[in-house]
Amino acid sequence: MEEVFYGLHQRSKKTWVFKCGIMDTQKLVFKPEYRKFCEENQCGCYNVNPACPPECGTVESMKQRVFAYEKALILQTIQNKDMDYKMAKLAHNKLTEQLASKIMESGNTDLLIMSAGPYRHYSCLSAYCVDAQEMADAVGMTCWGTDDKIRYFSQIYFMETYNGKHLHMRSGMERLTYALIIVLVATMSAWIMAMLLHLQPVDFIKIRMSAAMWILTRLAASFFGVFGFSIMFNSPVRIACSTAVLGAIANTLRLELVDLVALPPAVAAFIGALTAGLLASLLKNKVGYPRISVTVPSIVVMVPGLYLYRGFYNLGIMSLSVSASWFAAALLIIASLPLGLIFARILTDKTFRYCT
């Protein structure tokens, strides 16, 4: 994590110093009397920002919120006093948020961020009543110095293990592969049942609905489909809801391009994935949600399960040419999905060349 934070710090082109360390959350010291600093309202956020007292919760409830995690990543920046302290604090919090996004992209999406002062929807040390001096001593940092330097602290709380097992979801490709396996198993199960019950695929019954009703129906179905996949990937509910909205827009656009514009399904899938990637970048810049937690569930619903099912069915009855045709169409669509995300990343991320 230190290397990641250092890389983010270097790219930000800041000249101030940073330090970081990890400690057990059980070693944190909480002092309820620190809540009075919030009540003095020097930051102007008391009873205004939902992340600040009294709306953020009692001291005890926030303490238990911290103890739900095993480890605390302590981040510190050291800056000269002649710097604009507001801009310096904002830069520190942005670096913290970017690091949290990198951690979430590795698969650990259950994080708690404690910012340096109120920042967006994150609470600060005073709201949690954490003793900054005790915390700094525990990780070998200086809290208050006589060197005319300003020191900002933020924390990222995380679970070192999950249900006794280390987290394995380290990349979006693994998540996508996992989802594809589920779709493949579901497709093969449907094929086996169809063979046992002597069922065969037929065209859908034509339903008379207006174009507006079609769009609304597809938006609703896509929303719940993406939401389900997002929950399956252990995303928090708030991220799952945001992902579902983006996925519903992208998938409905894909379907409408096929029906209204008569685009080839693979091209429509590329545009749908591109749209999902662009919207995910906007969401990341707005609230800090990592791209990978948003884009993968959004494109999984675009995987052509019907095409795969028909391919397996025709393979089972030894209609090899028809089966190959369905499989080829499915593979084109599946290949178009990551390409759309890659193009979106190229368009929105100037540091994409640094990614590994």
Image (cartoon, grey):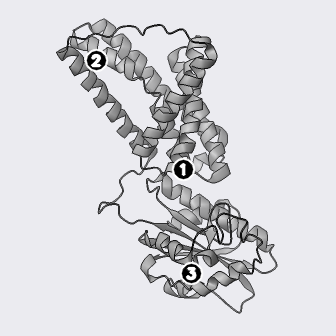
Distance in Å between CA atoms under marks 2 and 3: 59 Å
Determine the secondary structure under disc 2: helix
Q: In the image shown, does 296 or 65 lie closer to the viewer? A: 65
Q: Are marks 1 and 3 in contact (CB under 8 Å)?
A: no
- For residue 126, above or below residue 205: below
> Which kind of residue does numbered mark 3 sit on?
Val
Q: Position of residue 20 (x, y in %)?
A: 54, 74
- For residue 1, above or below residue 301: below
Which residue is located at x 62 percent, y 75 percent? Answer: 127
> Which kind of residue does numbered mark 1 sit on?
Arg
Q: In the image shown, does 306 or 94 lie closer to the viewer? A: 306
Distance in Å between CA atoms under marks 1 and 2: 37 Å
Report the disc number at residue 312: 2
Report the disc number at residue 238: 1
Which residue is located at x 46 percent, y 30 percent? Answer: 301
Determine the secondary structure under disc 3: loop
Of labels 2 and 3, the one closer to you: 3
Of labels 1 and 2, the one closer to you: 1
Q: Position of residue 312 (x, y in %)?
A: 28, 17
Q: Position of residue 244 (x, y in %)?
A: 53, 38
